[in-house]
């Protein structure tokens, strides 16, 4: 893997990260407090959470079938962690790039989210601690 460009980091930071909880989906942004995320973490009784995708390893576009297979494997790995999770996706606010489905995982540690993201060859993941301020976890 090569280092992540400033442009790509900027794109990650500008992404709308949507947690698809059934009753009230919500969007979080990097570096911004989210009351909805704070409430969701409290509802699950956790102090941290992360959003991870299996789509487009190292931000290189892949075929839909490859991305779907990677996410299916990711979801199986998440199930093995015995942590609650919800579907989620990261969406380009300009609409140029299609949303990348993934999972919001309640109670996952930064280290476990890092390892899982590395396994699926991601440059980064979204992590929030008890402050409910999402940040990028870089995998380089």
Image (cartoon, rainbow, N blue to C red):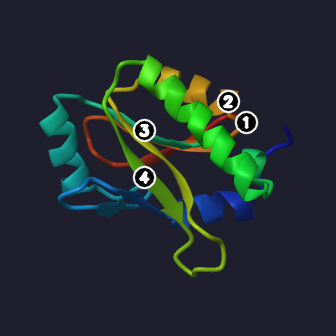
User: Looking at the rendering, which quadrant does residue 7 occupy?
Assistant: bottom right
Under circle 1, the secondary element is loop
> What is the spatial separation of the Cα atoms under label 3 and label 4, in whole angstroms?
10 Å
Instruction: Please identify, in this view, whether the residue under mark 1 or under mark 4 is nearer the observer.
Output: 4
Mark number displayed over residue 121 = 1
Question: Which of pointers 3 and 1 lies earlier in the amino acid sequence?
Answer: 3
Which residue in the structure is indicated by mark 4? 88
First of labels 3, 2 by sequence position: 3
Could you give the CA–CA distance between mark 3 and mark 1, rounded to whole angstroms? Answer: 16 Å
Give me the residue at 63% from left, 65% from top.
11
Residue 61 left/right relative to 93:
right
Res. 54 visible in picture:
no
Task: Measure how far apart labels 2 and 1 are at the Cα level.
Answer: 5 Å
At mark 4, the secondary structure is: strand
The first of marks 1 and 4 along the sequence is: 4
Give the percent coordinates (x, y) of residue 140: 73, 34
Q: Which residue is mark 3?
A: 50
């Amino acid at each position: 893997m090569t280092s992540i460009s400033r442009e790509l980091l900027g794109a990650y930071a500008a992404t709308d990260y949507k947690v698809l909880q059934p009753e009230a989906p919500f969007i979080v942004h990097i570096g911004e407090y989210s009351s909805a995320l704070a409430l969701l973490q409290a509802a699950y009784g956790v102090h941290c959470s992360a959003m991870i995708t299996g789509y487009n390893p190292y931000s290189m576009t892949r075929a839909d079938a490859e991305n779907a297979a990677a996410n299916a494997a990711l979801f199986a790995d998440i199930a093995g962690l015995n942590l609650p999770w919800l579907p989620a996706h990261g969406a380009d606010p300009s609409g140029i790039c299609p949303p990348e489905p993934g999972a919001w995982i309640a109670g996952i540690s930064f280290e476990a989210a890092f390892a899982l993201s590395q396994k699926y060859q991601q440059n980064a993941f979204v992590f929030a601690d008890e402050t409910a301020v999402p940040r990028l976890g870089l995998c380089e």
